[in-house]
Each structure stands twice: as C-alpha cells, then as structure tokens.
C-alpha cells in the first residue's frame, strides 16, 4: 500500500543528507510515517560518494568522519546496515626542505619527531592532549543534548544549566579558566601558551579555522581546536576515520536503517517550496508541481535556503528574516579531488607509511595567515592551506589496483570573490591549478600522475549541493552562531517560527561535521511534542 | 627457547615493534608496528598476511587413513571428497574435546590435519588396527594465511590456477611463482581468505611473491594481535583460551564437550563407533549443561560505570583472554567469559562465554564482571549467537 494513497505523511523531510536520514530513521523508529525527499540522484548531501570517473569512488565533499555520535550507531544499528569506519593513523606536515613532521599513533615516535623541532614541545605535547581531552569531555555533554537555554526559567532548562555548571565546577577552576581562554583566544595565541615550534603549531592551528572565514590569528578560533580532541569514531575517544567506500557509505547506512524502519526515500525529488496554510506548514510542493501533504515538514537544508528560499520572506516576521539574512555563511573553502596513477612521492621522506592519515599543507603560521590575507580581499589563496587525504591506501575499494584518490580540502576560497560569486566558474580551473601546484611543490611529479581532476569552488558547493554560499557547515561554526543562538537567537530547538516546520540540518545545534547529532536531536524534539 | 619459522628472515625485518611471542615453540609476531589496528583493518578492507607455520601439521597416509580419521574425530571422514577441507574436533573416550582443527583430503589415501597442540602420540595411540602412516609435517611446511577482501585478487596475480574457482573449504595444489604449494580456501578471520602450505625451502620465494603482488592491493603483514580480534568477531574458539584440552585438565569441571563449545554441528553420531561416541550420544540425549554463547556487553552501562569515576570508557584495542565471571540477574555465578574484544567493525563490545544452558538463548541477558578504576562492577550483557561478523564474502 502506498503511504501517499493511504493518507498524508506524519513528516516529510527535505534533503537526504546524513542528518535528514538520521532524523527520518529516528522518527520511523517511533512509528511515524516519514518521507525523505532528495533533490539529487544520489543520497548523502555533502556526505556523498560518486564515481566521477570509472573505478574511482570519490568522497566528493566531506571526506573524514570523526564526531558521528556513537549513540546513533547503536540506536540505528548502523554497522549492520553497512557503516564501516577505518581510522586514520598519521598526521603529516611536509616541509619544502627536510622530512617535515609526522605525528603517529605511537607516542614515542611522535615525541622523537617533534624533538627535531623542539625538545620542549615534544614533552609538552601529551600534556596538551590531556588538557584538551579533559575539556573535550566537558563540551561533549553540550553536543549530546539540545543547546542549554540561559534565557529560560523553565525548571527543565534550569536543571540542565545547573547540571552543566556542576560538571564545570567538578572539573575545577583550571578547567573554567581554560574554557574561557578557549572561547576568546585565537588558535595561535592559545597554542603559543604551550608550544614554541612553528612547524608543530601551524598544522595544529588549522583545526580552528576549518569552514570559517577567519584566520589562525583571529580571536575565537581556539574553541574549534577542541573538536579535534573529541573525535570518537566508535564510542572510545579516538580521532578520525574514513568511511568505507567514501563518506556516502555512511549516508547509505543511515538510509538503509531508515528504510528498514519503514521510512520512504525518494531521490530526484527537488522541493520547490513549503506548503503553508494559515501560517502552518502542511506539506511541500515539488518542482514538478506535485504536492505532498504532511503533518510536519522538516528541513535539513541550511537556514537561509529553508527560510528565504523554501518558505519565503513574505511568510515570516521581518525581524526573523533579518536574523536569517545576517546569519553568517560565507563559505571559505573548496575541494579538489584527483584520481592518480601512482602514490605521490614527498620530498625528504621515503615510503608511504606517513601517508596513512591526513597531510596538512601548513608549513608555517605566516603561510596560513598570508593565505587568509588574500581571501580577505576577495581572492582565493594562491598558496592555500590544504588538508590532503589518500583514502585508497587503507580502503583500496575506492580505486583500481595501484591507483589512488587524492582528496584535498582547500582553504581559502572565499565565496565572495571580488569578481562576484557568480564568476567563480571562470576562475575554477585557475583555482584548481593553484591547488595542484601547491601540493606539487612538496611532491614533484604530481601533475604527471593525474588521471582526472574535479574542482569544487564555494559556488559549486552552493549550486550543486544546496549549501548556501558554499558553507560546508551550513553556517559558520563561530561562537556567536553556536549553541542557543544556532541558527537564530531563541530558535535553537529545531522548531521554527512557522508552526509545524522544523529544522534538522547542520545549521542547528550542535552543527557541523558528519555528526548526525542535529538529525538525532531534532527527531527527539519533534517526538517530545507528539502529534 | 622458541625457534624461527621458515619466514623468519622476512618477518623479523618487517617487525619493527619487536613485539613477539612464543606460539607452539616458534617465534611469532604479535604486531609488526606498535599498534595492531592497521593490520586488523587490512583483514577487513584490504588483505593481511600472517605466518601460521607454528600450527601443528600431520600427514596421514595409507589405505586405512579415512577409516582411521573417522574413528579418531567426530566426523565421518570417509565421506570427505578429495580436494575438500573440513573443520572438526576430536575427543577422548569421555567425549571431552582434546583439540580442534582441520582435515584436508589431498588424495584418496593422503590427508593433512592441523592441530593446536602436539598430537602425534595421541594419534598414534588411537591408530590401533588401521593401516596408516602418520607423519608430523610441522617443520617440513611453512604456512601462510592470506586473509581479507583483496586476498583473491592478490593470489590470482601469482598462481597458475584459477583461484576464483577454489570454493570455500576447498584445497588444491598449485604453482605459486614457480613453487609447488597447496592452497586452501580457509582461514581464521571470518573473511574471504586463503591458507598456503609450502615446503620450507620454497617459503621465502612464496612470501616475496605474495608481498610484491599485494603492494597494489593494500596488503600488510599481520600478527597475532590483529588475528585475535578478527577471530573473535568471527566467533572462532581457541584451544587454551576458550577451552582446555581434556589432556591438560586436572579436574573434570575444566573439560568441555563439543556440544558445550558450540561444536555440536561437527559431531556425526549416526555412524560407526568413534572415540567418545558413547559419551557424546548420551550427552546429546540429555542435553549439554553449559553452552558456548556470544555476549554483547551493554555499552550504556559500561559508559556509566566509567563516568562514575569521571572517566571516558577505557577499553583496550587488543582482545582480552583473562577470563571474567558471568552471573545471572540475582548475582549467582553461571559461567565465564573466556575471551573478548571491542569489535571495530561491529561497534560492539563482544565476548565468548560458556554459561549454564538455561541462559544461553539468544536475546536473554546476563551480568558480566567489569573492572573499572581497579574496582569490580557488573554490567548487563545480551546473549548472541556467534559468529558476530559474517560477511557474504566469507563463503564466496
């Protein structure tokens, strides 16, 4: 029996990215009749695998998994539905001269590597990790629940604030001081409190700027360093991993889980707008004109696309429209994916063992800051920060034997280039050339090994993946847009000013990364309200 | 003092961690690098190459070989076809397990048997009137296990035989880079995989050929630590860990029957008498008192035990085998978990246990001891039926 014929859906979810699918699975698990509508021909949103050239499975956008919530894996039995995560083993920072710096799972080996730059830093490094792990433990409680609301006096809200307060109180004054520093300092200033080696600090500082339009010396960037220390890929605190077969594999596992629980999923079903009746969402209209009725409409799209695109300014209060217009997206990164016929050879280091993780093109803090300087004035960085991974080393299933995928996250590529964002297509290949040339400085011969190249600018991320302004997190992870202010002050609980319209994407708390937490928490909020 | 296997000159160069152990009197690598996890993930996503030469190997020749092995073990080996391998156990007269292993029928009157323990004397004592010759071929052969989804493609590069046609639990003679080898479609990882049996003089040549062929397929040399995690996921028991050979037990309590170990499916009772026949027939009728089960240790409860000490869950990435008591809901002791591991693939905290039969139904819950911050706790575990991990490619 077709659910549509039998009557309307309990919920229709706009967008088949990982958050939409997680939300669908939880709602279906609670017995709701759910329909997921995906605009593209593939599921996954920005967590997607595509065979762009024969035999190569690309993680087109997001490329590593870290903060995906273990509770979701258990609740939805994602391992049974095909989720497999392969942990990264190393963090390598090449230099133009010498062997660069590689950090290993082996602590003693890491210490020896860092000692070549600073014996002091080599010993401090584990202490720093311990402090950050402690802080990460505290912050984790914030990720695993809805954002605490300090403006509310409802007992449940006060109790949650008190609970968090107690955690910090128990952690002691040092933790509170450290938290304050993390909230206010720049990544570089924060790292300066511990380390002296530029070679070590540069690759560490970049986790503070990923996905933001800020530099490593901009205040407020220290906080995101923490996320690096909260990575948990299987319940135990660990770092980062590849999703088997690309990040789309994780999305497909979520989709299979959702379907096994009864959710319906349709691809190539772009939504034109949200249907409204007397200020209440009652369904969606597809681009082909079909109307789908649902008791609740849940958007996994970013706040701008949801409200200014699918709902429409005219159907919202002016003040709310203003806050959504001011919501900072300003994508700052691009992606360059390569298919190559051999592994890259790095200057100054033999073998491939140090390629079994991520490779940061971040040779110094000044290099990173200069990359930002160009972006401030509307240009892509001619020598950008690049986060390189070669997933085919550990997951050979994504490339033909002996051939490899090089996946590069590139910052900065500002959405608003001075020629205007719509002129990105004419700059696309120049941007790709700059990225390849940058990496080739460290790996001579790279160009000759390239079989295929895909360049995604922020403009492409917007046009192809529906990420407004190409922001990979559906809105900057800057402090003023986190917690109870994500996406707008007073609207952090997945509810929206439009009755029966909800949000479940990365643009809601806690947002960003392949976490699934937004989808999970949104489902919980929706189920708590009932029919 | 352990001695080197035929592959030692290669494995000792690769083993930069210097983590070795004694496996049946041979030097065996625990993990080649300081952490075994890459080797585990190679089993599941690429391929791993393990030196399994220390396995005890016996050649059984002669017109009476099939009849002898049928009488020695719990299976009717007379029915085993040439070119097939079978997994089984063998018992003492009381129907208690002496060891488990495989028997391959290489020719009408030639079988090869693997065992965890030295067994020549036991086989010899059990030979009686049968016209057989038993040879301990352990030192004559090197053995390699090539395991993982890419193992088939790697092997295809270096052998003259059509590897794809070698079915699950089949064995065949082949030429590997010019060396005569036996290749069986078997393993201890629960994944697609092969075992390769080589006369020791040819061992290095075979090792090098596989290593070269594996370069483009993500092949890693793998050690016993990674194997231990993989075999737990596969639900394979281990002699000396999950049970003790009846020959080494001081008490009756310590011995196990095939039924108690989940090996009941290997026992064929409706046939000519074999060692332990009468006792096993009796036990089958009465039902085993204990049963081997899988346990899924509740993560939420484990997490709260550690949270009580302000700690995140602390789990080793290595498998454990130190044994933990298992209780029922009212804290009565009902058995023991004998080994366990966090499964990186299934995202579950798993164990193998022998518990009272009345608790062995899949889905029922028991309590298992957990040590956190030096203190003992009990957390819930759900009974599962092994194998925990059972991909389609395992039998492909």
Image: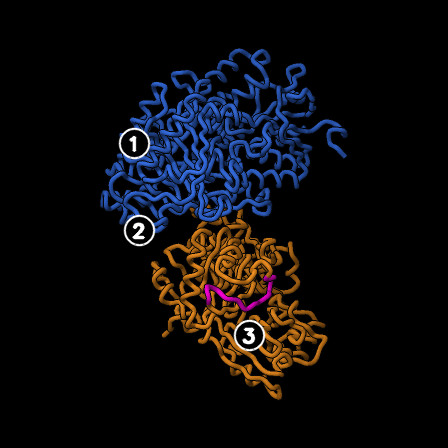
Chain colours: A blue, B orange
Q: Which residue is at the front of the view, B232 or B158?
A: B158
Horizontal placement of A385 versus B136: left or right?
A: left
Horizontal placement of B232 versus A6: left or right?
A: left
Mark 3 vs mark 1: in front = 3
The residue under the point 48% across, 71% down is B55
Q: In which quarter of the image is the N terminus of chain B?
A: bottom left
List x then y, in percent, for residue B35.
39, 54
Which residue carries the number 2 mark?
Answer: A109
The answer to whether any part of residue A180 appears in the image is: no
Residue neighbourhood size for the residue with mark 1, other residues' Cα within 10 Å, grouped as few (<14), some (14–19), many (≥20)? many
Real-space Cα distance between discs 3 and 1?
A: 65 Å
Which residue carries the number 1 mark?
Answer: A188
The residue under the point 51% across, 81% down is B135
The residue under the point 58% across, 11% down is A314
Residue neighbourhood size for the residue with mark 3, other residues' Cα within 10 Å, grouped as few (<14), some (14–19), many (≥20)? many
Circle 2 — which element? helix
Q: Which residue is at the front of the view, A94 or B362?
A: A94
Which residue carries the number 3 mark?
Answer: B112
| Relative to B241, residue A45 above or below | above
Q: Magenta residues, as a range?
A: B166-178
Q: Circles 3 and 2: CB distance less than 8 Å?
A: no
List x then y, in percent, for residue A234.
49, 46
In the rendered image, residue B334 lying in the magenta stretch gets the answer: no
């Amino acid at each position: 029996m077709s659910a549509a014929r039998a009557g309307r859906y309990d919920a229709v979810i706009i967008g088949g990215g990982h958050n939409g699918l997680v939300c669908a699975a939880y709602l279906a698990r609670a017995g709701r009749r759910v329909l997921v509508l995906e605009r593209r021909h593939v599921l996954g949103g920005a967590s997607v695998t595509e065979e762009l050239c024969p035999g190569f499975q690309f993680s087109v956008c997001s490329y590593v998994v870290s903060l995906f919530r273990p509770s979701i894996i258990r609740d939805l039995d994602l391992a049974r539905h095909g989720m497999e995560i392969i942990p990264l083993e190393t963090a390598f920072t090449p230099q133009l001269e010498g062997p660069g710096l590689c950090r290993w799972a082996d602590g003693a080996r890491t210490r020896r590597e860092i000692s070549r730059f600073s014996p002091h830093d080599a010993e401090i490094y584990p202490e720093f990790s311990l402090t950050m792990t402690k802080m990460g433990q505290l912050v984790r409680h914030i990720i695993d629940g809805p954002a605490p609301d300090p403006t509310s006096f409802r007992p449940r809200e006060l109790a949650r604030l008190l609970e968090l307060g107690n955690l910090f109180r128990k952690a002691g004054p040092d933790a509170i001081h450290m938290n304050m520093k993390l909230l206010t300092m720049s990544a570089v200033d924060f790292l300066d409190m511990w380390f002296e080696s530029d070679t070590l600090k540069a690759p560490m500082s970049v986790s503070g700027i990923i996905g933001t339009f800020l530099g490593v010396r901009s205040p407020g960037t220290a906080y995101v360093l923490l996320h690096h220390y909260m990575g948990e890929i299987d319940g135990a605190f660990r770092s980062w991993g590849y999703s088997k077969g690309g990040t789309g594999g994780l999305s497909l596992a979520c989709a299979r889980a959702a379907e096994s629980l009864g959710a319906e999923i349709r691809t190539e079903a772009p939504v034109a707008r949200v249907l409204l009746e007397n200020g209440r969402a009652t369904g969606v209209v597809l681009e082909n004109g079909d109307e789908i009725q649902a008791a609740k409409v849940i958007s996994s799209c970013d706040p701008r696309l949801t409200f200014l695109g699918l709902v429409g300014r005219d159907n919202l209060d002016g003040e709310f429209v203003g806050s959504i217009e001011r919501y900072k997206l300003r994508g700052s990164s691009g992606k360059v994916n390569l298919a190559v016929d051999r592994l890259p050879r790095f200057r100054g280091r033999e073998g491939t063992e140090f390629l079994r993780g991520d490779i940061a093109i971040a040779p110094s803090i000044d290099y990173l800051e200069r990359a930002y300087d160009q972006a401030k004035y509307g240009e892509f960085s001619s020598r950008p920060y690049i986060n390189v991974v070669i997933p085919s080393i550990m997951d050979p299933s994504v490339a033909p034997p002996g051939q490899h995928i090089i996946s590069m996250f590139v910052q900065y590529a500002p959405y608003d280039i001075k020629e205007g964002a719509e002129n990105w297509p004419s700059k696309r290949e120049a941007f790709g050339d700059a990225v390849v040339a940058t990496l080739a400085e460290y790996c001579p011969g790279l160009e000759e090994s390239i079989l295929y190249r895909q360049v995604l600018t922020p403009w492409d991320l917007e046009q192809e993946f529906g990420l407004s302004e190409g922001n990979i997190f559906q809105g900057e992870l800057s402090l003023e847009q986190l917690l109870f202010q994500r996406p707008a002050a007073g609207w952090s609980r997945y509810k929206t000013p439009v009755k029966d319209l909800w949000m479940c994407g990365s643009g809601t708390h806690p947002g960003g990364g392949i976490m699934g937490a937004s989808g999970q928490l949104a489902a919980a909020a929706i189920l708590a309200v009932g029919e | 003092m352990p001695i080197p296997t035929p592959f030692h000159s290669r494995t000792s160069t690769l083993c930069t961690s210097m983590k070795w152990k004694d496996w049946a009197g041979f030097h065996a690598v625990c993990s080649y690098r300081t952490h075994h996890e890459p080797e585990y993930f190679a089993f599941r996503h690429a391929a791993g190459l393990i030196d399994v030469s220390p396995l005890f190997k016996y050649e059984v020749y002669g017109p009476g070989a099939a009849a002898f092995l049928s009488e020695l073990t719990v299976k009717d080996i007379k029915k085993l076809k040439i070119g097939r391998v079978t997994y089984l156990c063998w018992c003492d007269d009381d129907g208690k397990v002496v060891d488990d292993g495989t028997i391959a029928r290489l020719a009408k009157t030639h079988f090869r048997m693997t065992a965890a323990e030295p067994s020549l004397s036991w086989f010899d004592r059990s030979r009686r009137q049968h016209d057989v010759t038993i040879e301990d071929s352990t030192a004559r052969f090197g053995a390699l296990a090539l395991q993982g989804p890419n193992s088939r493609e790697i092997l295809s590069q270096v052998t003259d035989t059509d590897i794809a046609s070698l079915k699950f639990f089949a064995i065949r003679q082949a030429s590997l880079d010019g060396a005569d080898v036996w290749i069986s479609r078997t393993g201890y990882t629960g994944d697609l995989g092969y075992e390769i049996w080589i006369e020791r003089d040819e061992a290095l040549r075979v090792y090098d050929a596989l290593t070269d062929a594996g370069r483009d397929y993500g092949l890693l040399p793998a050690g016993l630590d990674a194997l231990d995690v993989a075999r737990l996921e596969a639900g394979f028991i281990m002699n000396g860990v999950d049970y003790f050979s009846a020959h080494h037990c001081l008490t009756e309590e310590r011995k196990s029957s095939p039924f108690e170990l989940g090996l009941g499916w290997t026992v064929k009772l409706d046939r000519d008498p074999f060692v332990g026949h009468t006792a096993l027939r009796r036990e089958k009728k009465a039902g085993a008192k204990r049963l081997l089960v899988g346990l899924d240790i509740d993560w939420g409860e484990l997490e709260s035990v550690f949270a009580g000490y302000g700690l995140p869950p602390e789990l080793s990435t290595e498998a454990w085998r130190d044994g933990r008591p298992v209780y029922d809901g009212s804290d009565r002791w009902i058995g023991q978990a004998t080994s366990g591991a966090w499964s990186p693939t299934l995202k579950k905290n798993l164990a193998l246990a022998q518990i009272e039969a009345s608790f062995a139904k899949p889905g029922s819950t028991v309590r298992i001891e957990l040590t956190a911050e030096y203190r003992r706790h009990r957390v819930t575990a759900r009974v599962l039926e092994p194998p925990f991990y059972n991909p389609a490619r395992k039998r492909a």
